[in-house]
């Protein structure tokens, strides 16, 4: 139905229309009250079981660009008394991380009407904490004690959670009353010894300024970048210790920060030890497969690294603000490994088995920039999309539409470089004059090929 199609669009990219707008949904205030009325109308139109089948399918297949949208829709379902039991049951299945769990309650308690603190809600909270192994729970909450303004202590107070297991009780005490109270109460209990030791070290780790001690704690307890405090962010050896177990998608999240703090440099030279540690993560094939990284994501990070600093300096010069004389140097090794990573991620793109004709209007592509990422040219964005389909699908044609004509372009390799295709898009227009635009040129070309 039309309502189901609109719901699928909301779950995948946050818009009921077939128009995608990039950017973080939380930063864009997507979840404000004035934007929620349409979603509530859609939820009311869809049959009860069908609604939750759609939500579970999107979560199971991991096809949403913004997984928090799924939690947002579930929170809206939970506002209805009729749908609340099934919504909370689905949330219990889907809140597999502390971030998801806390984010669900941010949405559920953020807008009126609130879901309340009735028996079903308290049971959901209690089950989330008590059904987990005590050490697993300690690791999850130690890594994420709070998220987006919500703390575990807030939820423990709502549900009045108690546990007969000393280890789990120690975790709950740590969350609600702090590390000191936990140590005083459960420090001598042999059943809680492992959990208390772990949480004590995590708590000390965030306050510890000694680099050697921090690295030892990271290696002993396999801590992640989420455990870091701001005092550790500029310490190169701490990052090297983290990189040994860091997933490739997490590294991409922090590449800009490593550049900002000049981690790749040692004086005027490149720091080869640090570069090698980063490149080893980028070349980890198993990590790439597990992360399900997409080529376009890596290409955006590559463009950010190469072009963002230069573009910011150009903007500063136009507004007569002098930030620096020239942009920072670009590491050839890092660029090469990011390009190799793009090639590796092609294997993560699942083919659909359909035939695709991608029509690219390359008018003024050498001048136009992307609205959301101003340092990226439209030719680069178009190339990233086109090449991803070209590599994944057996039947895929890429057309350059100039005026009323459509010309197929031939790529020499089955796995071409996105940057080379972008250059082809940007330069083709300069040598051919474009007449009046015909948006159907690509469709006419495809129909002609089908007849032939």
Image (cartoon, helix red, strand yellow):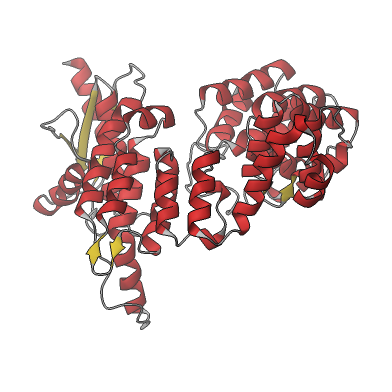
In the picture, residue 95 is in which quadrant? top right
- Between residues 61 and 170, which one lies in front from this camera angle? 170
**Residue at image x 90%, y 29%?**
119
**Residue at image x 35%, y 47%?**
300
**Quadrant showing the N terminus:** top right
Q: Where is residue 407 in the image (x, y as percent from the top left)?
A: 15, 36
**Residue at image x 29%, y 54%?**
377
Left of 110 or right of it: where is 317?
left
Q: Is residue 372 at all visible to an observer of this figure?
A: no
173 in relation to 313, above or below:
above
**Quadrant showing the C terminus:** top left
Labels in figure, total = 0
Q: Position of residue 240 (x, y in %)?
A: 39, 49
375 in relation to 352, above or below:
below
Left of 52 or right of it: where is 231?
left
- Between residues 234 and 109, which one lies in front from this camera angle? 234
Q: Position of residue 408 (x, y in %)?
A: 16, 33
């Amino acid at each position: 139905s039309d309502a189901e199609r609109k719901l699928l669009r909301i779950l995948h990219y946050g818009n009921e229309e077939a128009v995608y707008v990039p950017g973080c949904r939380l930063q864009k205030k997507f979840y404000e009250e004035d934007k929620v009325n349409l979603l509530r109308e859609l939820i009311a139109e869809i049959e009860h079981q069908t609604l939750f089948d759609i939500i579970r399918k999107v979560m199971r297949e991991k096809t949403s660009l913004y997984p928090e949208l799924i939690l947002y829709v579930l929170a809206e379902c939970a506002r209805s008394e009729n749908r609340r039991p099934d919504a909370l049951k689905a949330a219990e299945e889907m809140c597999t991380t502390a971030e998801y769990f806390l984010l669900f309650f941010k949405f559920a308690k953020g807008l009126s009407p609130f879901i309340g603190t009735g028996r079903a809600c308290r049971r959901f909270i209690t089950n989330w904490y008590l059904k987990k192994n005590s050490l697993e729970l300690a690791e999850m909450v130690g890594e994420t004690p709070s998220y987006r303004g919500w703390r575990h202590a807030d939820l423990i107070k709502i549900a009045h959670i108690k546990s007969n297991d000393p280890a789990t009780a120690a975790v709950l005490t740590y969350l609600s009353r702090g590390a000191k109270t936990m140590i005083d109460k459960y420090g001598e209990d042999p059943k809680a010894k492992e959990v208390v030791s772990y949480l004590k070290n995590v708590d000390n780790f965030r306050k510890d300024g000694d680099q050697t001690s921090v690295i030892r704690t990271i290696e002993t307890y396999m801590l992640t970048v989420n455990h870091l405090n701001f005092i550790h962010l500029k310490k190169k050896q701490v990052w090297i210790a983290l990189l040994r177990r860091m997933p490739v998608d997490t590294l991409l999240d922090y590449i800009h920060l490593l550049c900002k703090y000049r981690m790749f440099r040692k004086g005027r030279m490149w720091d080869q030890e640090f570069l090698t540690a980063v490149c080893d993560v980028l070349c980890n094939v198993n990590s790439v497969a597990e992360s399900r990284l997409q080529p376009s994501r890596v290409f955006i990070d590559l463009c950010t690294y190469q072009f963002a600093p230069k573009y910011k300096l150009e903007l500063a010069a136009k507004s007569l603000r002098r930030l620096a004389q020239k942009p920072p140097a670009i590491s050839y090794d890092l660029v090469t490994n990011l390009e190799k990573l793009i090639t590796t991620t092609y294997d993560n793109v699942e083919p659909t088995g359909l035939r695709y004709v991608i029509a690219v209007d390359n008018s003024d592509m050498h001048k136009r920039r992307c609205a959301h990422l101003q340092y990226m040219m439209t030719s680069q964005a178009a190339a990233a999309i086109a090449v991803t389909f070209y590599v994944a699908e057996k039947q895929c044609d890429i057309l350059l539409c100039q005026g009323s004509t459509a010309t197929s372009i031939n790529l020499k390799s089955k796995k071409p470089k996105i940057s080379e295709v972008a250059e082809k898009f940007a330069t083709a227009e300069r040598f051919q004059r474009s007449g009046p635009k015909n948006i159907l040129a690509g469709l006419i070309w495809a129909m002609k090929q089908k007849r032939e």
